[in-house]
Every structure is written in structure tokens, then in C-alpha cells.
Amino acid sequence: AIPLVVAINTSLAARNGMLVRDRIAMEEARNLDAIIFDKTGTLTEGEHGVVDMVTVDGVAEDEALALAAAVESDSEHMIARAIREAAEQRDLTAPDATDFEAIKGRGVRASVDGNEVYVGGPNLLTQLDSEVPNHLQRFADEAGQNAQTVVYLVRERELVAAFAMADVIREESYAVVDALHDLGIEVAMLTGDSQDVANAVANELNIDTVFAEVLPEDKDKKVQELQDEGKLVGMVGDGVNDAPALMRADVGIAIGSGTDVAVQSADVILVQNNPMDVVRLVKLSRASYRKMQ
Ligand code: ADP
Ligand code: MG
């Protein structure tokens, strides 16, 4: 039988837009020492727009953008959407691409006109062992300092262009971090994005702990790292990539338009896409279980 106080508690949660899949996690939420947030789409809007680009000698901007859009034509990632949109805005027609492949946490690959073409972030460059020309490196450094995400276009192993994309911090995120600090909870951020971008967002929001350039298969290890310090850890995320971390966490929280996989891996689902509900969840847990004692 479900103890009465827990039943009341979960229906109260439901009325606040929280679906509780695991009642024990709901009780544990009051004792969380640290909460890790996925960056993109959780603390930020996640609506990347291409704000700047640079190419190597002999490659025109339009050519590079059309090629990148072709490689991204099969991807659902927000970065892919932004690149396709930028190409559309310039009325560019993407060349035909085939043999699409998503490279988890790194980027995408396709064949275009017999060439092997990639679009992806710093993790991809490491994997391909691509050399970065000086002016592209300067472009990337500057963009990173402005919290812009940089992705690269690589054709036949040669880096030919870089794109800077802007994301914006969600207005609610500032108050969320402050409120969690007031509750004595450490706030951490976990992202596949570059260290530069992660640091810029973390400084702006006053976030205590930053895990950047984390590959999807390593995200749960970051949760474990904090748990190994003896902390009870909550994890907030929305993507397929976040599922193992949500499962590893003591309290896994899927947010908003979370993917099915994220939702199925979470203990609590926040129906409205509002990170402030994480604070409400902790407060509700503390209030409910204090009464019970
Ligand atoms: P997160 O959810 O933390 O943003 P992802 O695992 O979705 O992380 O992506 C990590 C990084 O991999 C991105 O910042 C980007 O550099 C690269 N990436 C992933 N998918 C794509 C894509 N479709 N096009 C370009 N780059 C991508
Ligand atoms: Mg994500």
C-alpha cells in the first residue's frame, strides 16, 4: 500500500507539473547535495543561430555553408537546424549528400560529390586529427570567449570553414542557481560543448562545478564522480544523451519536451519546460517529509 503522506505528496507534485515515476527519489530530493544540469536547452534556450563564419583561402562562404547544410540535412540536432536555416536565409541550394552518419557527441558525416565531409565540434577535430589553421583558431577562441559554440567543416580531412553559433542563457536560470545555493545545494553543469563556452555560461550563472567536452558515453561518469565524493546527486536533462546520467543520478529529472528515452530514464518528469520547477521539487520534498517526521 502507498502510505497516505506519499500519495498526497505525489498528487501535490502532479498539480505542480511534476510527474513522479519513483516515489523514493521524490523523498530523496530533500537531501540532495548537488544538482547537475545539462547545459544546452536546459540552462540555455538551445536555439543556436549562426552568427559568424570563416573559411580557408579558396573556399567561398556560400560554398562552405551550402556544403555544411548538405551534411546536416539528415540531423535533428539544434546545430544542424541552425546551419540549414543560415543556408536558407542566403537562398543557397545544398548539394546532394548521401551516406549520412551521426557521430555521437561529435558531429555528422556524409558523402558529397565523392568527398567525405564532416561537420562537428572540437571533439570531432580531435578524432580526425585535423590541423586548425591559425586564423580559424583565432576565430574559434574569440567565439568561445563570447559563449558561442563553434563547429567545423572538414572536407577530405582538410578543415575548410568554421561557424560560430549563439545560444542564450534562459532568463529563469539565474534565479534557479541562486535559489539552489540558498537551499545549500551545489550547482553543476554538464555539456558536450567546448570548455570555453561552458566556462562563459558557468561564470555568468555562478555555477560551482563545470564538466565540459564530455562525450555522451561519459556523462554518467561525471554523476558518479560527485557521488564518489559522498554526495547525493540530482541530474536534470532532456536528451537521449542524458539518459545514462539520469539513471545514474540519485534523483533523475527529465525536463520539458524531453525525449522519450530521457523520460523513461528519469525518476521525476517536469512537464513544463521550466528549470525553476527543480527548485520547487526540492522544496516540496523538504516540506512534505518534514511533516511526516
Ligand atoms: P550537448 O547535449 O551537451 O550539447 P551533444 O552530445 O548533443 O551535447 O553535442 C556535443 C557536441 O557535439 C556539440 O557541441 C557539437 O560540437 C557536436 N555535435 C553534435 N551533433 C552535431 C551536429 N549535428 N552537427 C555539428 N556538431 C554536432
Ligand atoms: Mg543536450
Image: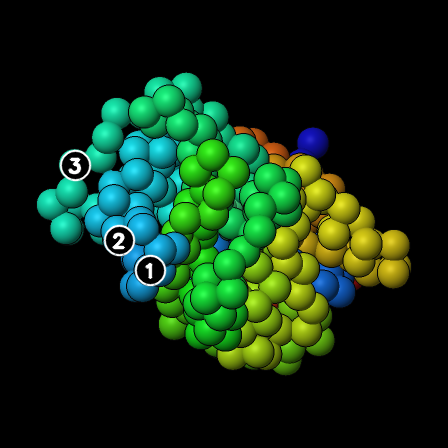
Quick check: is the Cβ at mark 2 less than 8 Å away from ligand 1?
no
Q: Is 202 or 1 nearer to us in this picture?
A: 202
Residue 193's place in the image compared with 244, above or below, is: below
Which residue does the image show at 60% across and 40% down from the upper left?
128
Q: Residue 249: give x, y in percent of width and height.
A: 71, 47
Which residue does the image show at 57% across and 59% down from the upper left?
194
**Disc 3 designates what residue?**
93
Q: Are marks 1 and 2 in contact (CB under 8 Å)?
A: yes
Q: Residue 8: give x, y in percent of width and height.
A: 56, 49
- In the image, is 133 to the left or to the right of 247? left
Which residue does the image show at 64% across and 77% down from the upper left?
181
Q: Quadrant of the N terminus?
A: top right
**Please, what secondary structure does the residue beneath circle 3 have?**
loop
Q: Quadrant of the C terminus?
A: bottom right
Q: CA distance from mark 1 to mark 2?
A: 8 Å
**Please, what secondary structure does the residue beneath circle 1 have?**
strand
Q: Residues within 10 Å of mark 1 (few under 14, many from 20)?
A: some
Which residue does the image show at 44% across and 29% down from the upper left?
116
Residue 143's place in the image compared with 6, above or below, is: below
Q: CA distance from mark 3 to mark 2?
A: 13 Å
Amino acid at circle 1: Met
**Disc 2 designates what residue?**
61
Q: CA distance from mark 3 to mark 1?
A: 18 Å
Q: Is 89 or 229 nearer to us in this picture?
A: 89
Give the mark toward the camera: 3 or 2. Answer: 2
**Disc 1 designates what residue?**
53
